[in-house]
Image (tube, helix red, strand yellow):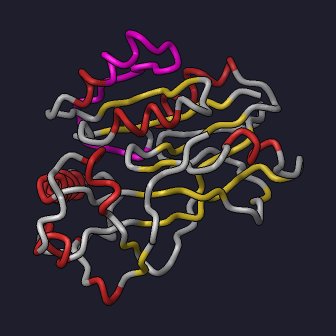
């Protein structure tokens, strides 16, 4: 069973090295598209790829973000896949899988073609900033991020390969996506990691929206500060460190 993971990145140098390393535990290939990073992300990906053949720097796209970027990678590599293989159709640079992904997918019933995530979405609280808990080094700061959103999101992450799968540039995922497994794969999601990263995230997403990317409609705030949450609205996680297998 092969697993090919499709990763689109932009200005994720603070986290992508760790997340790619994590994905290589269970991926046969991590196929990377860079959407015009200016913080060294693309250079870091190429440096990792020089010593790790699982990492494939596939494309540098300098134009506006659009939802079809992953579709290009899917079409380029689909000839290498068989019916028993899996795609991680959306590997995000800020997501980590604390379970044995291969074992999880092997136990999905044969008739299910899609697996959604059950996401623990970590946040930075107003109190975290006030207490100066974060240094800006995510590898060191991760153990200090104890608070997450109270609800868990479910989005498609894995799809079983089939010769009939089609992925057009205007589609967010391949079709047909068939029956969805009732069992969701756990994900630790660190979309907010430091003050500087949140500022970058806000600016990049506002620009993408202005360019007509068709995504990030939920990003309606007036500044990066709106990413912050009070601890009273969050769920506390005693041990936020990521498990490895």
Residue 95 is inside the magenta segment: no
Rendered location of residue 206, percent (x, y): 18, 59
Rendered location of residue 216, percent (x, y): 32, 61
The foreground one among 148 and 33 is 148
The foreground one among 113 and 217 is 113
Q: Residue at the right extreme?
A: 110
Residue appearing at x 40%, y 72% in the figure: 148
**Looking at the image, is 102 positioned above or below residue 213?**
above
Question: Which image quarter is the N terminus in?
Answer: top right
Residue appearing at x 22%, y 74% in the figure: 228
Rendered location of residue 195, percent (x, y): 13, 59
Residue appearing at x 64%, y 46% in the figure: 158
The foreground one among 60 and 191 is 191
Q: Is residue 103 left or right of residue 126?
A: right
Question: Which image quarter is the C terminus in?
Answer: top right
**Looking at the image, is 81 positioned above or below residue 127?**
above
The foreground one among 100 and 65 is 100
Q: Is residue 108 left or right of residue 30?
A: right
**Looking at the image, is 19 positioned above or below residue 34?**
below
**Looking at the image, is 29 positioned above or below residue 88?**
above
Q: Quadrant of residue 233?
A: bottom left
Rendered location of residue 109, percent (x, y): 87, 52
Q: Which residues are magenta?
A: 45-67
Q: Is residue 123 left or right of residue 135?
A: right
Residue 53 is inside the magenta segment: yes
């Amino acid at each position: 069973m092969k697993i090919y993971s499709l990763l689109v990145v932009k200005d994720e140098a603070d986290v992508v090295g760790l997340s790619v390393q994590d994905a290589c535990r269970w991926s046969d290939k991590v196929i990377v598209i860079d959407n015009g990073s200016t913080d060294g992300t693309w250079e870091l990906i190429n440096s990792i790829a020089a010593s790790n053949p699982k990492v494939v720097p596939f494309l540098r796209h300098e134009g506006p973000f659009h939802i079809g970027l992953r579709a290009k990678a899917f079409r380029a590599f689909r000839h290498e896949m068989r019916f028993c293989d899996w795609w991680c159709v959306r590997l995000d640079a800020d997501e980590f899988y604390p379970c044995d992904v291969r074992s999880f997918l092997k136990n999905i019933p044969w008739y299910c073609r899609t697996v959604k995530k059950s996401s623990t979405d970590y946040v930075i609280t107003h109190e975290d900033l006030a207490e100066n808990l974060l240094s800006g080094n995510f590898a060191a700061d991760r153990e200090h991020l104890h608070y997450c959103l109270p609800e868990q999101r479910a989005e498609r992450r894995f799809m079983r390969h089939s010769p009939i799968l089609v992925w057009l540039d205007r589609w967010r995922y391949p079709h047909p996506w068939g029956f969805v497994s009732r069992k969701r794969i756990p994900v630790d999601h660190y979309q907010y990691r430091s003050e500087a990263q949140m500022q970058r995230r806000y600016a990049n997403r506002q620009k993408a929206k202005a360019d007509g990317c068709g995504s990030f409609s939920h990003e309606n705030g007036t500044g990066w500060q709106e990413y912050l949450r009070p601890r009273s609205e969050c769920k506390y996680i005693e041990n936020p460190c990521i498990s490895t297998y």
